[in-house]
Amino acid sequence: DARVTQTPRHKVTEMGQEVTMRCQPILGHNTVFWYRQTMMQGLELLAYFRNRAPLDDSGMPKDRFSAEMPDATLATLKIQPSEPRDSAVYFCASGFRVHYNEQFFGPGTRLTVL
Amino acid sequence: EDQVTQSPEALRLQEGESSSLNCSYTVSGLRGLFWYRQDPGKGPEFLFTLYSAGEEKEKERLKATLTKKESFLHITAPKPEDSATYLCAVLGNSGWGAQKLVFGQGTRLTINP
């Protein structure tokens, strides 16, 4: 049963600490997306990659957020330093280039910054 | 800028009581309109993609329809297990190769037994 996996599922940290979230896309998918979901803003796209190259990261605060794909099986989203307003659920999704109409979401990482 | 507005924000129905959820959108060059279901504590799950006005898609008790300005998700004779938040999203012409979905705030649907 192919699915997107994310770690950790829950993270509580203190303001100023570095946070790294990891995502393993479905094998064979070449497009990876990072989303953030909050009650106030809903689901927002932060960044996405195709064939491991960043295509758009305009949704991310550049001074503290960074997203990378070290290899085809791992995508990371890093926040440094973290702030309380970063508290949210962060979702990773993956898809095929030629089937851009479908994105398969992971279970999310619930981040709480105190 | 692409925008999606969903209504109502929340909807409570009795089991078997049919209804519709609305998704109004503005987008420059619609490449697709998507419906997702999201259960509490989980990621969104893909339901449908609609590409052009007049198109309809069905899955079990759900039917999605599309016009040039809005989409409806019709729920026929719903069951308690249909309770979830339903998200609508659009993909517009924001650049070559872009896959930038814009989501609405969702409709939280509760089906009472």
Image (tube, grey):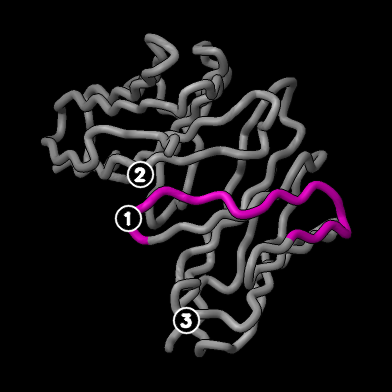
Q: Mark 3: give few (<14), some (14-19) or many (20+) Cα within 10 Å.
A: some
Badge 2 element: loop
Give the residue pinned by disc 2. Answer: A107
Position of B31 compared to A51: left or right?
right
Quadrant of res A63: top left
The span shown in magenta is B40-57
Q: Chain of mark 2?
A: A
Q: Chain of mark 3?
A: B
- Residues under labels 3 and 2: Cα distance? 24 Å
Q: Residue at x 52, y 15 (%)?
A: A54
Q: Answer yes or no: are tags 3 and 2 on the same subunit.
A: no
Q: Mark 2: give few (<14), some (14-19) or many (20+) Cα within 10 Å.
A: many
**Which percent across, then down, holds residue B79?**
50, 80
Q: Residue at x 87, y 55 (%)?
A: B53
Compared to A98, does B72 lie above or below? below
Residue type beneath disc 1: Gly
The quadrant of the image that shows the N terminus of chain B is top right
- Residue B41's tag is 1
Badge 1 element: loop
**Which percent across, then down, holds residue B56?**
80, 60
Q: Are marks 3 and 1 in contact (CB under 8 Å)?
A: no
Dot 3 or dot 1, earlier in sequence: 1
Q: Are marks 2 and 1 in contact (CB under 8 Å)?
A: yes
Compared to A77, does B41 lie above or below? below
- Residues under labels 2 and 1: Cα distance? 7 Å
Position of B20 compared to A86: left or right?
right
- Residues under labels 3 and 1: Cα distance? 18 Å
- Residue B111's tag is 3
The quadrant of the image that shows the C terminus of chain B is bottom left
- Residue A47's tag is none
